[in-house]
Image (cartoon, grey):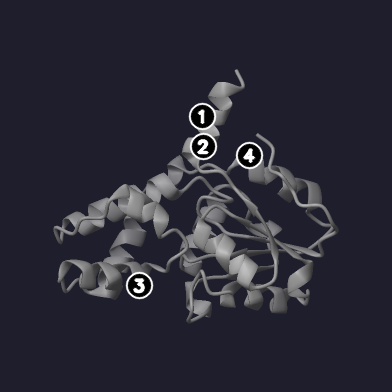
């Protein structure tokens, strides 16, 4: 499956990390379920994917309100991230996104714009050997308003010295696509792991 790149010339590519560059969403969900089970906190898979792009602290705070819990946000967040790090040996890059990275690397600057914490992004990209491809990483520590707000993408464009309208965003979630649109940027929707598997089965 090839991604459908919009027509036009772009001066920078901005990539989400989880579910876009790396096929990490299933691993993150395992980590979430394990961490939250200790608090008897439900987190349906559909909700997990719907909240793709939200910061870890936002997810825990919202779940606290939804279920009348008092989970310590920082402590649970760190525990969840450590559980994810234990799963990193299983992590792989997404081939459909590797293609435009390899095609344009060295021609235009790249940034990662993630709802995840910087350490998580760095460790994920290091695991798949892609960390050196990106000029800057905008992580959860770098902004207040998360996707679908445009803030994170605008910060990335500013760091790269590129106008928002000249950036192309690669995202796997509706919140991320909304954020790119709000930032005045064109975008490419990366199919989910499930969609990619179905497409590959259909092409055989």
Furthest residue to the top?
Answer: 204
Q: On the image, numbered disc 1 is attached to which residue? A: 198
Using the numbered discs, state the Cα–Cα distance from disc 4 to disc 2 in whole angstroms. Answer: 14 Å
Furthest residue to the bottom?
Answer: 144
Q: On the image, numbered disc 3 is attached to which residue? A: 57
For disc 2, the neighbor class at 10 Å (few under 14, some 14 to 19, many from 20) is few
Instruction: Please name the residue shown 56% across and 65% down the image.
Output: 178
Q: Position of residue 56 (x, y in %)?
A: 37, 67
Q: Is there CB contact under 8 Å for labels 1 and 2? A: yes
Instruction: Please name the residue shown 59% across and 50% down the image.
Output: 21
Q: Position of residue 13 (x, y in %)?
A: 72, 60
Q: On the image, numbered disc 4 is attached to which residue? A: 95
Using the numbered discs, state the Cα–Cα distance from disc 4 to disc 3 in whole angstroms. Answer: 30 Å
Instruction: Please name the residue shown 33% across and 67% down the image.
Output: 59
Q: Position of residue 104 (x, y in %)?
A: 80, 52
For disc 1, the neighbor class at 10 Å (few under 14, some 14 to 19, many from 20) is few
Using the numbered discs, state the Cα–Cα distance from disc 3 to disc 1 in whole angstroms. Answer: 33 Å
Q: Nearer the viewer, mark 3 or mark 1?
A: 1
């Amino acid at each position: 499956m090839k991604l459908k790149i919009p027509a036009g010339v772009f001066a920078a590519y901005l990539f989400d990390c989880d579910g876009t560059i790396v096929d990490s969403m299933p691993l993150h969900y395992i980590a979430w379920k394990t961490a939250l089970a200790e608090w008897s906190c439900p987190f349906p898979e559909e909700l997990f994917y719907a909240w793709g792009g939200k910061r870890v602290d936002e997810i825990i705070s919202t779940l606290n309100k939804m279920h009348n819990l008092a989970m310590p946000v920082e402590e649970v967040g760190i525990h969840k991230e450590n559980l994810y790090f234990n799963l990193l040996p299983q992590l792989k890059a997404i081939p459909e996104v590797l293609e435009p990275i390899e095609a344009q690397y060295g021609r235009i600057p790249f940034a990662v714009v993630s709802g995840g914490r910087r350490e998580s992004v760095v460790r994920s990209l290091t695991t798949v050997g892609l960390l050196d491809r990106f000029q800057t990483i905008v992580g959860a520590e770098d902004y207040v308003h998360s996707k679908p707000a445009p803030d994170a993408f605008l910060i990335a464009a500013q760091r790269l010295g590129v106008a928002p309208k000249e950036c192309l965003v690669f995202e796997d979630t509706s919140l991320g696509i909304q954020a790119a649109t709000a930032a005045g940027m064109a975008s490419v929707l990366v199919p989910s792991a499930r969609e990619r598997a179905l497409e590959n089965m259909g092409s055989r």
